[in-house]
Image (spheres, rainbow, N blue to C red):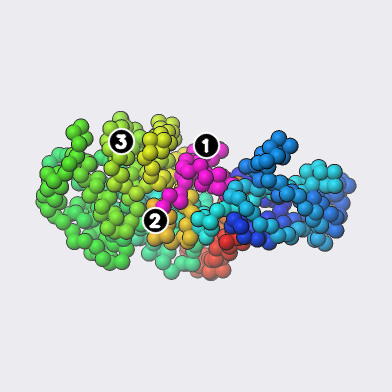
Amino acid sequence: MMQFKPNKNLESYDVYPKVFAIGKTATIHIRQLGSKTGRNVDGRLPEFIPGQEYKLMIASLEGGRDNEWPISADMPVQPIVCDENGNFTFEHTFTAEGQYFLRFMDAEDRRINQFPVFCVDKDLVGRYPFRGDLHLHSCRSDGRQEPEIVCANYRRHGYDFLAITDHERYFPSLDALRFYKDVPIELNILPGEEVHPQPVDGMREPVHIVNFGGEYSVNAMVEGIATNSRGTDPTVRSLYGECPPVMTKEEYDELMKKLIAESDVPEGIESFPAVCCKWVFDEIHKANGLGIFCHPRWISNMVNVPERFTDYLMDTKPFDAFEVLGGELYYEQNGFQALRYYEDRAKGRNYPVVGSTDSHNSYESYEEALICSTIVFSPENERKALIQSIKDYYSIAVDTISEEFRLVGDYRLGRYACFLLKEYFPLHDELCIEEGRLMKQYATGTPDEKADALRVLEVLCGRVKKQREKYFCF
């Protein structure tokens, strides 16, 4: 199952590369996939005849129609001959960022077909699109499936990276990571948790915060649910076996009271949530993680975070990224959060955005599964690179609640992501389907089925990387 509808040309033609670096001459191939070179049964000729000459127009989508915008339009035309197999190969240097059409015409300038491609500016050269989820749950907190099953199901739907972020528990993400440690897969499984600080003298911190990719657990820094569930050994509290010592509840209470006494929280803002939020985000930063401010517009009787407090966080910005799209279907959450993001941009507030499913069931039969994701433009699908790329504003949130996807984020990245979701990710997702199914077979099968899955995964591993290198001319 492909989550994004492909351009119909993807069924009949392979165009590669699809993405080019600005100012760099690229060799472009257009290959017919199974088309006949002779007449079809009904007498029709194929679109392109071997040996025949055509006109190739390389047209900038952003330039407008040449007959109406003669100054802006960018539409050079050149003759091109179809080779003996019905294919084309040519060189071109793109000089401006944006989408282009490789438009083929006959001698009378009638359009035969066209193929979209994209040129990126220098800062995006070497940055590949990786789609992932930074906030989701397993049955180790309030989800439905084991961590390894969640990973398999998400990979089957084209996700390149994810972190299990169970409530108050970091160790489930380590369980998932270690389960597949020796399995040859291209899904990047990261550590993570949803942090819920303990109350102090009846005061609660209700803001939901995700520690994405952090090297140790913030929840497990204090005695409580996190440490009672799996213990205090550093191997279950950290990625590398190194983490701060566990505080007693009394030590934690004293620390929070001290921070409140030293704080300068403005009048009208609840002191404990403000101080505790900052402490959590600071600890995530110490753990080299990404601190995500999650779904303030989630409605549980009332909105999870009052507007006044959200404004305070947007002004002080202790977080690294805002979860502008999350795991609810009603407009009052994601719709209002998207409106806030654009209004904040207009006011001069700027922050990276991400989209996550916050799913508690990873099967597509669950209506809230697979409803959001994040595309990160990163040099590689690796923890530190992904985190830094998000911090550097190279991410965009993807809304797949409705049949047609929607994007929230930077306009420039949105144009690029829209192209990729139609022209690249459908092909990418076809490869991920196979890997995800085999991951589930490895996780749930008989000994023979596990061995078979492992053998096939060893053969398949590396295909997504090769495909990426094929379609991106960097």
The amino acid pointed to by label 3 is Asp
Q: Is residue 75 visible?
A: yes
Relative depth, front residue between 111 and 25: 25
Q: Earlier in the sequence, mark 3 or mark 1?
A: 3
Q: Residue 311, which numbered label?
A: 3
The residue shown at (32%, 59%) is 288
Task: Tell me: residue 73, above or below residue 186.
Answer: above
The residue shown at (62%, 47%) is 99
Query: Which of pointers 2 and 1 indicates the residue nearer the eye?
Result: 2
Task: Tell me: residue 363, above or below residue 384.
Answer: above
Disc 2 element: helix
Relative depth, front residue between 474 and 190: 474
Query: Which of pointers 3 and 1 indicates the residue nearer the eye?
Result: 3
Verify CB contact (< 8 Å) between mark 2 and mark 3: no
The residue labelled by disc 1 is 402
In space, the residues marked 2 and 1 are separated at their CA atoms by 28 Å
The amino acid pointed to by label 2 is Ile
In space, the residues marked 2 and 3 are separated at their CA atoms by 24 Å
Give coordinates of residue 416: x percent, y percent: 55, 47
Disc tally is: 3
The residue shown at (31%, 66%) is 240
The residue labelled by disc 2 is 387
Disc 3 element: helix
The amino acid pointed to by label 1 is Ser
* Magenta region, residue range: 392-420
Report whether 3 appears left or right of 26: left
Check residue 250 for magenta coloring: no
Q: Is residue 361 visible?
A: no
In space, the residues marked 3 and 1 are separated at their CA atoms by 29 Å
Disc 1 element: loop
Please rate how many residues cluster around mark 3, counting C-alpha atoms within 10 Å: few if below 14, some from 14 to 19, many from 20: some
